[in-house]
Amino acid sequence: MKLLTVGSVAFDAIETPFGKTDKIVGGAGTYICFSAAFFLKEQGIISVVGEDFPSETLQELKEKGVNLDGLQIIQGGKTFFWSGKYHNDMNSRDTLATELNVLGTFDPIVPENYQDVDYLLLGNLSPEVQRTVIERLVKRPKLIAMDTMNFWMDIALEELKKTIKLVDVIIINDEEARQLSGTYSLVKAASIIQAMGPQIVIIKKGEHGALLFHGEKIFYAPALPLEEVFDPTGAGDTFAGGFMGYIASTDDFSFENMKSAIIAGSALASFCVEKFGTNRLKEITTTELNNRIARFVELSHFQMKEI
Ligand code: AMP
């Protein structure tokens, strides 16, 4: 198996200045898998849902090549529920509810047929669960990437640091990088985080793109200037899924290839925000994706004569 993701499969209720949803399907793991599926015919997920989770979504994931042997369905259990409300600028949001439900007692079992996995993506979950999966893999994957959030820094910093030490890539946003490193400059923050373990630090800056720190080397990718952002939920997970899906499908984690992976992730994330939930992500065509990647190339390409 090329890529294994550990991440929440959830119900979300979202409020943005454009509208409001009741419970819709969300979860970091869901966004990651739909996104990585653009590059991979087969991938796996370790997660948990309750018996209230729609079988149609599980079927859609299967049709995209997601193996669900690692997805536990707890009879009588309720699926994780998260609710958030975005502010007018869409860059910040308030969490209105986090109901862990079946995620609260989640024991991530690694099925036998996942043991040969090449690339591992630890979605935003408790650092203990993330670390348990690393420990339960008999053979270390070629590359381990993780996402996390300020929530874990606030309540489980020491546990989080233990997990960070074990991974090769950390993908976080600018505020999280500042909180984790205790410094404002993102360049300094990246080097402090590198000293914690991961040699590759990716800092997402929302509508301002993403920075890649790869050892000593740095790359900056813009975000596509969009006229309208409808719902930013899952954009970070979509980015991570596209990034790791691209790396796993090319089996190359050199600096040069990581630049392309970042653009692939950014292009997919730019679609994700156009509609509520995973809706837009599920309908993107290869032509649309290629056209958007071409816009990224145009956006960041220029020639200049020597002065
Ligand atoms: P993002 O917008 O990239 O931060 O991801 C949003 C997704 O993360 C939503 O679909 C939520 O279901 C999921 N989520 C939010 N909080 C948590 C949490 N504490 N643990 C796991 N997943 C979460």
Image: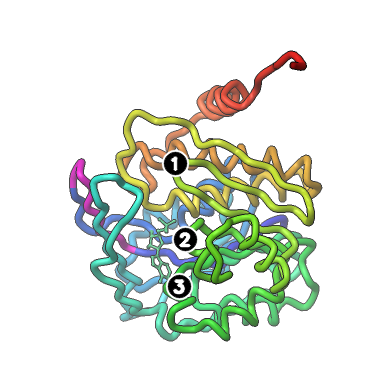
Ligand 1 shows up in the quarter that is bottom left
Decide whether residue 154 is among the magenta residues.
no
> Which residue is rendered at x = 59% and y = 66% of the image?
122
Q: Which residue is mark 2?
A: 175
In which quarter of the view is residue 24 placed?
bottom left
- Give 296 or 72, whichever is nearer the viewer: 296
Nearest to the eye among marks 3 and 2: give it.
2
- Give 45 or 289, whichever is nearer the viewer: 289
Tally of numbered tags: 3
Q: Is mark 3 within 8 Å of ligand 1?
A: no
Asked whether the viewer can see residue 10, the reply is yes
Instruction: Kindly identify the amino acid type of the residue bearing the numbered disc 1.
Output: Glu
Q: Which residue is mark 1?
A: 207
Q: CA distance from mark 3 to mark 2?
A: 29 Å
Residue 293 picture location, percent across and down? 58, 28
Decide whether residue 16 is among the magenta residues.
yes
